[in-house]
Amino acid sequence: MEINELKQSLIEQRANLQLFLETLLKQRRAIIENNIVSLEESIAAEEQLLMRIHNLEQESKETIKNLVRTHGLKVQNYSLSMLLSAAPAKSEIKLDDLFNLQNIIQRLVNEISRANEHNRVLVNHARSFVRETINSLVNDNSAQLLDRKI
């Protein structure tokens, strides 16, 4: 029964990570298009998704703890990877679906990391542009440029 609970939790985790990736891509589009409303909406959605993802991680960890205790597995920590490496010794635990979900989740996490890095670069470029613009407006040398009559 606990395997099914873990599987369901991982399925929900996968769905939330997919939504998180889509949210990061919407953020990127909002940054590029300078759409503040869309950016604020995506940040709010990101916060909600992060909370859901965290809760699902805690739920999965508790289920893994119970599985480890129930089946008398020896693990260093209560992670899915440790469970999957320790469980093959116990033939009554069916792991194929869990391996597949772990691979899918890992790929999603890698995509999220890349999207997050791209967004970070865009934000840094935007901040740099704003900083340079402010410096050019405030700098005494540029005052002559601004005072010129056209």
Image: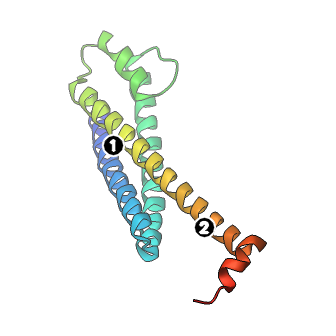
Which residue lies at the image location 34% right of the left edge and 45% below the top edge? 13
Q: For the residues carrying marks 1 and 2, which lies nearer the camera in this image? A: 2
**Local secondary structure at mark 1:** helix
The vertical placement of 69 against 14, above or below, is: above
Return the residue at label 2. Answer: 130
Return the residue at label 1. Answer: 9
Which residue lies at the image location 37% right of the left edge and 59% below the top edge? 23
**Local secondary structure at mark 2:** helix
| Residue sitting at the far bottom | 149
Which residue lies at the image location 67% right of the left edge and 70% below the top edge? 136
In this rendering, position of residue 142 left or right of residue 18: right
Q: Amino acid at mark 2?
A: Val
Along the line of sight, the residue nearer the viewer: 119 or 109: 119
Along the line of sight, the residue nearer the viewer: 23 or 60: 23
The answer to whether any part of residue 7 appears in the image is: yes
The answer to whether any part of residue 139 appears in the image is: no
Along the line of sight, the residue nearer the viewer: 131 or 140: 140
Q: Quadrant of the C terminus?
A: bottom right
| Residue sitting at the far top | 89
Picture coordinates of residue 7 (x, y %)? 28, 37
Q: Amino acid at mark 1?
A: Ser
Q: Residues within 10 Å of mark 2 (few under 14, many from 20)?
A: few
Residues at badges 1 and 2 in contact (C-beta under 8 Å)? no
Picture coordinates of residue 49 (x, y %)? 42, 57
